[in-house]
Image (cartoon, helix red, strand yellow):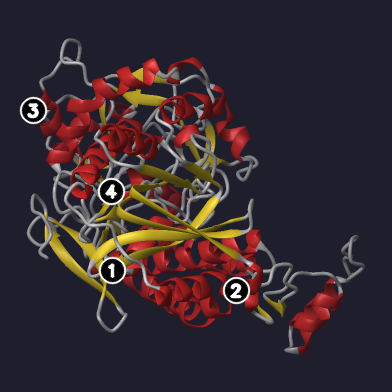
Amino acid sequence: MNSTNEMSGLTRRTFMTLAGGAAGVAALSSFGIPTGWAANKPKVAPADVSLALDTTDVLVIGGGMAGLFAAVKAHDAGADVMILSKGRLGSSGQTPFAKGIFVYDPGVAGMTLDEFVDSVSRSALGSNNPLYTRQMAGNSLARVKELREWGFFESPLYNNCFKRPIAERSIPLLERVMVTHLLKENGMIAGAAGFSADDGKVHLVAAKSVILCTGAGGFKPNGFPICDLTHDGTVMAYNIGAKVTGKEWNDGHPASAENPAACFDGWGNMFEQKPTTTGVDIRHDLGVDMNYRAYVAGGPVRMGPPHQQETGQVAGGPYMPLEFMRNAPPGGAGGRHDDTPQRQGKGGPPPGMRGPRVGGSSSGMAIHKSEGLVPINDRCESTIPGLYAAGDALGSYMAGAIYTQIGSSLAGSAVQGAVAGEAAAAFCSSTVAPVIGKETIARVQEEMLAPLGKEAGYSPAWVTQTLQGIMIPNFVLYIKKEKLLQAALAYVEELRDHHVGMLRAADFHELRLAHETANMIISAEMKLRASIMRTESRCSHFRLDYPEVDEKNWRAWINIYRGEDGSMKLEKQPFDSWPVA
């Protein structure tokens, strides 16, 4: 019996017949069904897009918590500052979702700063950078006091309180600008360029220093509020030679098994809450243990408090130190995940983690602060002089490769933004303003607007959906083994080599999607190559074919950089060290 699509009048039998051959693509298009390849119908001509030029000392890219403090502190240190933000100040990325900010107050913490850092290192299995762990905790109280003065804790919406310090300092702010290129001259950062859908212009800013506060990213998964984050800053920096780290780790935020794509249904109460502070409570959370259980026993998984799941045991899986199992006796040697009573949590589950859960809602994102640009010191400086990063754009390994402290992500973004702002301002004081040549400007404009000039090509939405189908399966991204990682890599390389150059755009919205899609493909390649290279299981990276922690060979981070031939290169960087130039 044929089933009929009510909107198109196309029967299932006809659909399958048409889709089976090369002529099917054109036929499907005639029925109004979107296809990957199609003629472009541009509403904007590249030649009609005007250019706006600006100069500043410090250019901050991003309008979240890290960007706020980077701009304020750079200004207060004497630098001219400008902000470019892909979204609205305080209202895009992960910042509006974050409602808890960690405060280390020595008077009430219950442990010394040294004890806090040591405990985080034990939970992170040594994968954290203790200098950034200490920096976050030691400066958190000062940052929270400033946020309180700006009214941060008075409303669930952050735009007004973020605007207050920016307006008081008359810091120029351009919102809804999709930055696509970082500029480098004579081996140093020289500025950035992007386009605005609001004024229809290309904006190029020459700057002595740039601070990336662009957040992390994913593969536009449904069910978790990170859909506008696509690793733009990371990929732009990689393209001009910066080293990147942390791509093998995975964030384990779930979604509701009922209507899993309904992000607000699952997490809306987080958006509606006023922010609060959190105290010391060191954990080993948001790894891939739920993904492992679903892989072995089937999903969805019923979630309770952290680490509390359905009764019954599942052998094997990711390793967790016994000390950080909820209600376990302290000082244990550790063990595999199971569902013994010692894992029963105290209190209720976090919002969005009640009832049956499914994984994949944060697919493509790593643990907070564990991926991004490789720092060369504790001042948030990257491997390119003058280029800094803060928050989830910096691979600081503040908490290592597992989420160890609730609220530390937001606190870390505030602290690192302030550190980067002051460091960038100091850098500018002894740096000559860059001169960006006409040839560079013309090349950047041409590359940026290229999808608008395509007569035909692939829809960014279709390529994104193809990428999601390759990367999001549990047995590729989370529960890994080499054969499947290599298979996925072959598909991603095809997207990189063939599809990216044929992405089309009819308007500025599609142009943004085209650049986001290209960035996600590069990020996917990074994740697959790093996951293949790390032949062990640790924290939020789990290999079925290498299920043990390998202390002999893998007390190291993986850095990724672009080789002279344009290919992707990987290297080890031992824990507790800075990268080799």
Residue 114 is marked as 3
Q: Is residue 395 visible?
A: yes
The type of residue carrying mark 4 is Ser
Could you tell me which secondary element the residue under label 2 belongs to?
Answer: helix
Quadrant (top left, top right, bottom left, bottom right) of the C terminus: bottom left
x, y (%) of residue 46?
63, 72
Q: Give the amino acid type for the residue marked by disc 3 in the picture.
A: Asp
Report whether 40 appears left or right of 157: right
Q: Earlier in the sequence, mark 1 or mark 4?
A: 1
Q: Is residue 170 left or right of residue 240?
A: right
Q: Which residue is mark 4?
A: 370
Q: Is residue 161 left or right of residue 108?
A: right
Q: Which residue is mark 2?
A: 451
Marks 1/3: CA distance? 42 Å
Q: Residue furthest bottom?
A: 22
| Residue at mark 1 to residue at mark 4: CA–CA distance | 29 Å
Tell me which numbered mark, 2 or 1, is placed earlier along the sequence.
Answer: 1
| Marks 1 and 3, the one that precedes in the sequence | 3
Mark 4, Cα crowd under 10 Å, few <14 / some 14-19 / many 20+, is many
Percent of width and height locating residue 480:
35, 62
- Quadrant for residue 462, please give it: bottom right
Q: Which residue is mark 1?
A: 185
Identify the residue at horizontal 36%, vertical 40% (top origin). 286
Residue 284 can be seen in this image: no
Query: Between 530 and 277, which is closer to the camera in this rendering?
Result: 277
Image coordinates for residue 221, horizontal then vertical, percent: 54, 52
